[in-house]
Amino acid sequence: MRFITIQGPTASGKTALALKLAHALDTEIISADSRQVYRYMDIGTAKPTKQETQGIRHYLIDVVDPDESYSAGRFAEEAGAIVRRLNDEGKLPIVAGGTGFYIRALQNGLFESPDVDMALRIRLMAEAERDIEKVYQRLTEVDPKSAERIHRNDAKRVVRALEIFEQTGISMSEHWRRQQEENSCRSFDILILPEREALYERIDKRFNLMMNNGLLDEVKRLIEMGYKPDDPGMNAVGYRELVDWLENGGEIDAAIALAKQKSRNYAKRQTTWYRSVEFDLTLRDADINIYSVAEAAQEKLAT
């Protein structure tokens, strides 16, 4: 498989860059966004409109209903099939989105992790609650590569990495390495990462625009359709805060401020993820010579 990825935190400009590159390469775009897969959730997930897609075909948008789950494994299978077909047609597809785990699954495959051992998980979580630093230190000893990628305060992911090691005797990073050897693909990876203050400003402005474009009405409509706050799709940032406001009342401005804050927090977590990944090209914004980028991608993937 040969494809281009465009990755970056929320509101960084991935869609604009992907469209420019798709026009330059006469190709198509696969969305790697874990929220845009949900039907009826258009405004709050920043789906591109028909006008915004500029005639470029997009895939894996509006795939499941908000009460259904969608996994990285399913994404890898479905996106992989699209990539192979487009490769057969002589095209280099663009995989664009902020769900890094989806793209990693497409690139590396997914190893079959062991079933959850609840007794082990409860023990490790209790240890993490008492002293997360001690538990994280243990991870650095048995799986230093995973420790580099996982924030020391992310107890859930620290514990999961230790679970895999204790259950299999093999580190999670080694599982990934072996899986990557078996998965045959080449990609040209682009990261778009604006300066933090500029990114946060864009996040706030975009949420204001979503509200002006009818996000609250969209949330009300989803509730009227019977979707519940704990449905997989409804857990998205922006939707969750507005649902809480509709159910509990209070000041709408407080709900909006909370949604913006959680969006900024999400962008911060995404940025941490990207710093552990190697990219062929890192950009601050989409204002570049797109043809030079297209040429670089074609050159790498042709060899």
Image (cartoon, rainbow, N blue to C red):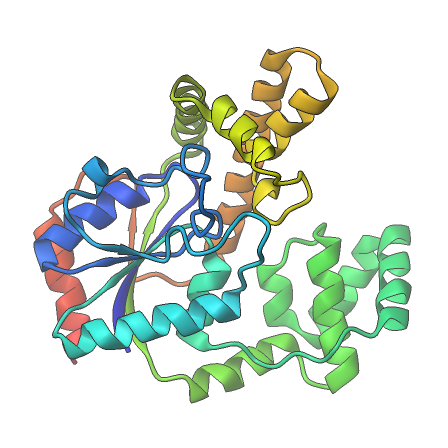
Q: Is residue 178 above or below residue 91?
A: below
Residue nearest the observer in this picture, 16 or 220: 220
Q: Is residue 59 above or below residue 140?
A: above
Compared across the picture, whether 89 is left or right of 157 comes to left
Measured as percent of width and height from the top left, residue 35 is found at: 48, 47
Q: Name the residue: 56% across, 41% down.
A: 236
Q: Name the residue: 70% across, 69% down.
A: 161
Rendering quarter of residue 230: top right
Count of numbered circles on the image: 0
Residue nearest the observer in this picture, 55 or 6: 55
Hey, which residue is sitting farthest front in the picture? Answer: 225
Locate the N terminus by quadrant. bottom left
Residue nearest the observer in this picture, 279 or 182: 182
Compared across the picture, whether 175 is left or right of 4 comes to right
Q: Is residue 48 above or below residue 3?
A: above
Measured as percent of width and height from the top left, residue 279 is found at: 34, 61
Q: Name the residue: 59% across, 41% down.
A: 234
Rendering quarter of residue 40: top left
Compared across the picture, whether 201 is left or right of 129 comes to left
Measured as percent of width and height from the top left, residue 298 is found at: 14, 68
Q: Is residue 156 above or below residue 35?
A: below
Locate the C terminus by quadrant. bottom left
Residue nearest the observer in this picture, 257 or 246: 246
